[in-house]
Amino acid sequence: MSAGNRLRRAAGLVCVAAVVAASAVVVYRAFVISYRGGSMYPRYSSHRADPMGLRVLHDALARVPELRVTRFQQSMSRLRTEPATLVVAGAIRSDDPRYIIEHIESFVNAGGRLVIAFDAEMVADDLENEAWRRPLEDDNEGEPEGEPEGEDAPAATEGEPESTPEGERSDEDSEAAGKKDKGDPFDFFVNIEGRWGFGFDITSSDDEGPMRAGRAEDVQAELLPETVAWVSPCVFTKLDESWITLYEFNGDPVIIERKDGEGSIVLATDSYFLSNEAVRDNRATGLLAWLVGPHRHVIFDESHLGIQRRPGIMSLMRRYRLHLLLAGLLAVAALYVWRCATSLAPRHSEAQQQARADEQAALEADAALVGLLRRTIPQRWVVAACCQAWRHDSLDAERHGEAAVREINEAALTSTSESVERYRALAALVNERKKP
């Protein structure tokens, strides 16, 4: 290869390497920008810094010296039952495993404060789907057939229990109703709406301009503001008597609270008032401080959004600071690949390589001849074969004479020594005959 070709090849490799490096830098910068902004996370995540996230609230609480703010990114069954405030933003309507709900209830009973703010858009979509499904289910079931009245009505048979008067229930009915309220222990999934006693509905507003929710009249709290910005028409319905309405929208509750054991549960139909946009434009500082409560540990749950930390090999290496070990293993692997790809011995010139190839070919030819002789001539007939080949050499036979040839043949046939010794003796005899 000429010097010009080598130069052009090196220039091409440098250009390709520069393009690859520039592309890697661009991809890395784009990833860093996306990661810092948190746009890869679901909305209402405390990792997001855009208007749909809770990063501002998380960082603001983390700057308070008296508070300890953490993110929970494991299974809810691993939540420690301690006096703390658990914030679950962007929740949706779903049936959750029974053991998860019971563990959350034990967290609240131990003195914890549970704040659940639902995703109003998802709840509204779910309610609309239920409204569409309900007429179809009613049409499929059909209308029940009417019972005959008056004289045609069948009389009660003996042994059949009489109907229970309205407003009264037998012990069996009460027990069955209690099991239904608490949930069948053999059912794996539980719906918190029926378990905790609340429901959802969509209301309409005739007010023009920004929507706001007002504080309930019977609520006496200095921290709670009179009104807060509200962007969703989703409200609570079918509330149990244990719930206390804190804020209302058009007369319907949107933020409710109840005591449970030593702790409390707070529910909100929307998560907007917790978002970065609301903290910037419509900050309700008193409400946010009231939600935190008296606890000094605030936990932002990320597991319900699908963000869970599952420790693997790399996380263990970071924990135990095995970065140098990993770098050493990569260096050894790179050296092994380099050793397999190239030789560490210096390169020879073309003339030396050609001479070495010829030498190797000659050695291979000699080895082939030796192998051929070993396969065709037995060891005890080697000397005789040599004598026969020497005898067929007419020039050498004429030079020594017939008497010398006959003497050499007799010595080769009558000798009883080993083949090597016989060959040496015959070679010495031939050399003596060559002397003048």
Image: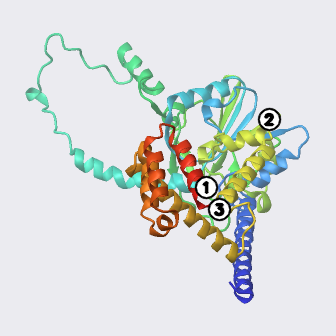
- Front residue of 323 and 205: 323
Q: From this viewpoint, which residue is outermost toward the bottom?
A: 4
Q: Disc 1 or 3, which lies upstream in sequence?
A: 3
Asked if 85 appears above or below 339 in the picture, the reply is above
Q: Secondary structure at mark 3?
A: helix
Asked if 425 appears above or below 56 in the picture, the reply is above
Q: Which residue is mark 3?
A: 341
Quadrant in which the C terminus is drawn: bottom right
- Front residue of 173 and 20: 20
Q: Quadrant of residue 277?
A: bottom right
Q: Which residue is mark 1?
A: 432
Residue 313 in the image: x percent, y percent? 67, 41
Q: What is the three-letter code of the residue carrying label 2?
A: His
Asked if 141 appears above or below 400 in the picture, the reply is above
**Is 205 left or right of 226, judged from the image as shown?**
left
**Is 413 left or right of 74, judged from the image as shown?**
left
Q: What is the three-letter code of the residue carrying label 1?
A: Glu
Which mark identifies residue 297? 2
Residue 232 in the image: x percent, y percent? 60, 57
Tell me the CA gap for discs 1 and 3.
Answer: 59 Å
